[in-house]
Image (cartoon, grey):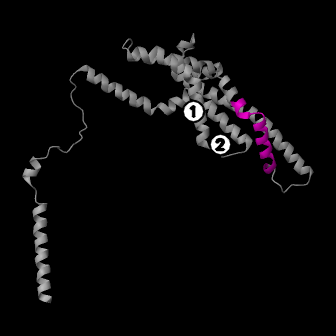
Amino acid sequence: MGNKACRRYIVWILLIGVAGLILSAPCPAFAQSQAFPLPTIKIGVGEAKDTGEVSVLIQILFLLTILSLAPAILIMMTSFTRLIVVFSFLRQAIGTHQMPPNQIMIGLALFLTFFIMTPVWQNIRETALVPYMDKKISQSQAIDEALKPVRKFMLKQTREKDLALFIHLAKAPKPKNTEEIPTTVLLPAYMISELKTAFQIGFLLYIPFLVIDMVVSSVLLSMGMMMLPPMMLSLPLKLLLFVLVDGWYLVVGSMVKSFY
């Protein structure tokens, strides 16, 4: 019985091996009958058929460049910088270092930026984007028209002292009007003006909360409770004050009005 079983196993192994060889062999008929060929990807530089194809490729490259620079444009040429710095100062002044979270603070600053910059973007759409899509102006003219509302917004928020500083550093001639100010000079001047304004607002926000901290510390010291951290009492008082005066309404309303 043992020899018969071994013979059966050997026969089965041989049959399985032959079947595997048959199945693994390539079948020309099956290869020729395939209805869907395998795809491939080729990347290279070839000869364009006409000038229109070249212009489309340049436009796509320009769009990708704009998308890669979008975060920097959002931070440098809008109201986002002032908003996020003031919100950070407010959170530090109250003493809630992680509340609201960073995601909420950035989201609030972002949507307020969209709200503040909506008139500027509508002007860009009417004077630059729509005429360009209708092929009434060229691409370079569209860029120039799009920069005008943005430059007007930045010039309104930029101090003359900061503009003079960067004009002097760039060794550029003194401009006769605002149109002669280079954008490369206007951008850094606008940034430091926004930072200075944000720090001034942050200082004003610190004053009422600083008074509460000083009063609580003095009361605890006079009562001999030096082992009790003043933050344990001042934080609820500051939150209560902020809620009673409707702090978010006042802060957000004042911030938005500061741009008009």
Q: Is residue 187 left or right of residue 250?
A: left
Total numbered labels placed on residues in the image: 2
Q: Which residue is mark 2?
A: 100
Would residue 204 be visible to someone looking at this image? Answer: yes
Between 248 and 113, the residue placed more toward the observer is 248
Element on which disc 2 rests: loop
Give coordinates of residue 187: x percent, y percent. Answer: 55, 25
Between 163 and 169, the residue placed more toward the observer is 163
User: Which residue is at 43% across, 29% downward?
Assistant: 66
Q: Is residue 48 left or right of residue 5?
A: right
User: Which residue is at 72% across, 30% downward?
Assistant: 250
Local crowd at mark 2 within 10 Å, few (<14), some, or many (≥20)? few
User: In the rendered view of the protein, which quadrant contains the C terminus?
Assistant: top right
Magenta-colored stretch includes residue 171: no
Element on which disc 1 rests: helix
Give coordinates of residue 106: x percent, y percent. Answer: 59, 37
Would residue 150 be visible to someone looking at this image? Answer: no
Q: Quadrant of residue 133?
A: top left
User: Which residue is at 56% across, 27% downward?
Assistant: 114
**In the rendered view, would you say 70 is above or below 21?**
above
Give coordinates of residue 230: x percent, y percent. Answer: 81, 50
Q: Which residue is mark 1?
A: 110
The chief SS type of the magenta part is helix
Extent of the magenta region: 231-251
Q: Quadrant of residue 204?
A: top right
Q: Is residue 244 left or right of residue 46?
A: right
